[in-house]
Amino acid sequence: MKKLLLLILFVPMTGLGQEVIVNGITLNAPNGFIRSDAMGETILWIKPNKNDVGSDMISITYIKGHANSLDTESYCNKQTRGVKFIKNENFNIDGRDISICFKKGDNDFLIGQFLFKKRGYIYIINCMSYSGPTKSYFSDFSGDPNKTIMYMVAYMAGRFMLY
């Protein structure tokens, strides 16, 4: 029974490819991330660190809507149960201004969230990295969750800009 349970949990993480095509946009995550369909319609990639802890995650949710139907800053500044707003920062990535909202989850994950409007859809991209007290949970990318978040944000923004 334990083997069956392990198999059921493992198959959604490995049985699917890294790449996914969403509304004509080919999306993937940086090297080392594994795509999971454990969250249904939300696209989720997880990157385990050297201790096999899922220290980095990228999720994408999308909705059909007009480009002006969702105000980025007001959406970002809303706190939810278990997630606190930290700050909003604007960055220029490859000639395009992107507003990134930083939040901190009660689960010790730092979250960099940005919205991308393209082809009649609004994409909500969350880049998450562990930032709590347990050092063995930190990302292998860098010891600084802020740098890890910015790397993931730049990578994902670049994927959307290609199309």
Image (cartoon, helix red, strand yellow):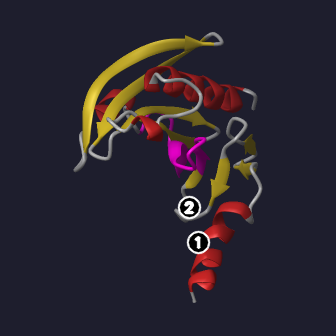
Question: In the image, residue 111 lies at what x, y percent?
Answer: 40, 35
> Looking at the image, do the residues carrying marks 1 and 2 touch, with CB atoms under 8 Å apart?
no
**Residue at figure coordinates x 62%, y 77% from the top left:** 8
Question: Mark 2 or mark 1, which is nearer the start of the sequence?
Answer: 1
The span shown in magenta is 45-69
Tell me, yes or no, if residue 78 can be seen here.
no
**Residue at figure coordinates x 75%, y 28% from the top left:** 162
- Determine whether, in the image, residue 145 is placed left or right of residue 34: left
| Image quadrant where one finds the N terminus | bottom right
Instruction: Tell me the crowding category of disc 1: few under 14, some 14 to 19, or many 20 or more residues within 10 angstroms, Cα based.
Output: few
The picture quadrant where one finds residue 38 is bottom right
Question: In the image, residue 28 lies at what x, y percent?
Answer: 71, 42
Which residue carries the number 2 mark? 41
Asked whether 86 or 129 is in front, the reply is: 129
**Residue at figure coordinates x 43%, y 14% from the top left:** 90
Asked whether 109 or 65 is in front, the reply is: 109
Task: Classify mark 2: helix, strand or loop.
Answer: loop
| Image quadrant where one finds the C terminus | top right
The residue type indicated by label 1 comes to Leu
The residue type indicated by label 2 comes to Glu
Asked whether 121 or 129 is in front, the reply is: 129
Residue 64: give its label. Answer: none
Q: Which numbered disc, 1 or 2, marks the residue closer to the eye?
A: 1
Question: In the image, residue 39 lies at what x, y percent?
Answer: 52, 62
Which residue carries the number 1 mark? 9
Question: In the image, residue 103 lies at what x, y percent?
Answer: 32, 33
